[in-house]
């Protein structure tokens, strides 16, 4: 039997990714970017836990074959130890990450969407910051679209009005909305410093201090999809700083709820109602 890990023996970083019929070529691009970032940060061992929430035999077989093939030893890759969990039921995005994090231990943990690609220096910048800035509990990157446009992942506290504008209305109406979206996306508070305090971080990519994650009880699993990251950000803010790092960059291939179909709109509206019921309703602004 192996002895339990001590704080000194814990690895610096572990990673979790939740899949739901996610394109495997997209997952390959993410894992390739993790491998490059690990090499740049001189990390010799990084555990990556993928959680397959498809609950579909064909997709499960494909993802299993993909992980096995990707994990085959090579001479020029960092040591990524990739495991695949296949729970019998899909209990939601946050629950998937909680399940993954129950399987690994590390000083810091990276929560990721499969539709993200990391810049090569992302791990080095994030780990250097977290080790030097002990008050930082949650660290977020700057996000960009595949075409290079800012994704504005960091957010201010939302209103019902602005959530409807951003996620559920046509583009022409967004243009006529005035400054509401700019305030929500924190475009009215540009940062001239490397580190910027933010209210809400995107669950597509967030580095968390593992001790704080455990102290707050991880993701609230009563959220199925959407707003579990906002809820986690506010609970983390009670234990430390929630910070955006201007020099840590990712490409995010994700899209709004309205473009993903009616079921996503239902999850979005349900998550928003749960969030506002807990943290307080704001209708306008």
Image: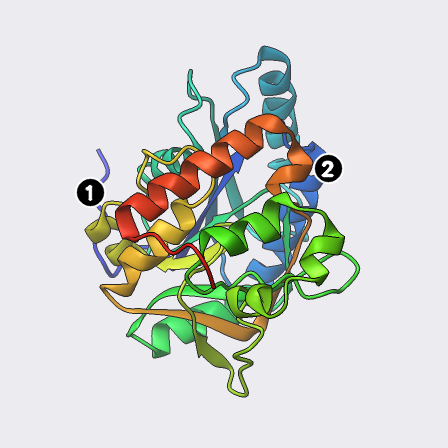
Would you say residue 16 is visible in this rendering? yes
Would you name the residue on which mark 1 appears?
A: 3
Would you name the residue on which mark 2 appears?
A: 25
Would you say residue 40 is visible in this rendering? no
Find residue 58 and report its horizontal and vertical position in percent: 64, 13
Q: How is the image coloured?
A: rainbow
Foreground residue, 255 or 78?
Answer: 255
Where, by quadrant of the figure, is residue 144 drawn?
bottom right
Find residue 281 and report its horizontal and vertical position in percent: 34, 52
Extreme-right residue of the structure: 147
Where, by quadrant of the figure, is residue 36 drawn?
bottom right
Quadrant showing the N terminus: top left
Q: Residue at x 43, y 46 (%)?
A: 227
Q: Secondary structure at mark 2?
A: helix
Find residue 237 and report its horizontal and vertical position in percent: 29, 64
Q: Circle 2: is it few (<14), some (14-19), or many (20+) Cα within 10 Å?
A: few
Q: Is residue 6 left or right of residue 192?
A: left
Examine the rendered structure and indicate whether residue 84 appears above or below residue 26: above
Q: Residue at x 60, y 52 (%)?
A: 165
């Amino acid at each position: 039997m192996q002895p339990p890990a001590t704080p000194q023996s814990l690895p610096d970083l572990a990673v979790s990714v939740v899949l739901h019929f996610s394109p495997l070529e997209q997952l390959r691009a993410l894992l390739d970017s993790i491998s490059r970032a690990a090499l740049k940060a001189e990390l010799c061992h990084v555990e990556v836990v993928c959680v397959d929430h498809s609950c579909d035999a064909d997709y499960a077989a494909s993802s299993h074959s993909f992980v096995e093939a990707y994990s085959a030893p090579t001479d020029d890759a960092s040591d990524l130890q990739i495991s695949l969990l296949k729970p019998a039921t899909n209990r939601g995005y946050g629950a998937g990450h909680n399940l993954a994090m129950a399987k690994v231990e590390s000083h810091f943990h990276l929560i990721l969407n499969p539709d993200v690609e990391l810049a090569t220096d992302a791990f080095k910048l994030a780990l250097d910051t977290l080790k030097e800035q002990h008050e930082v509990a949650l660290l977020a990157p700057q996000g960009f679209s595949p075409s290079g446009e800012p994704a504005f992942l960091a957010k201010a506290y939302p209103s019902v009005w602005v959530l409807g504008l951003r996620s559920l209305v046509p583009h022409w109406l967004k243009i006529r909305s005035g400054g509401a979206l700019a305030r929500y996306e924190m475009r009215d508070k540009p940062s001239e410093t490397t580190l910027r305090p933010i209210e809400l971080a995107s669950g597509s990519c967030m580095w968390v201090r593992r001790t704080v994650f455990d102290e707050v009880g991880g993701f609230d699993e009563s959220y199925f999809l959407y707003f579990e990251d906002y809820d986690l950000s506010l609970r983390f803010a009670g234990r430390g700083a929630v910070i955006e790092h201007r020099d840590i960059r990712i490409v995010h291939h994700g899209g709004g709820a309205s473009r993903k179909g009616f079921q996503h709109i239902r999850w979005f509206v349900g998550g928003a109602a749960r969030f506002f019921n807990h943290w307080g309703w704001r209708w306008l602004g």
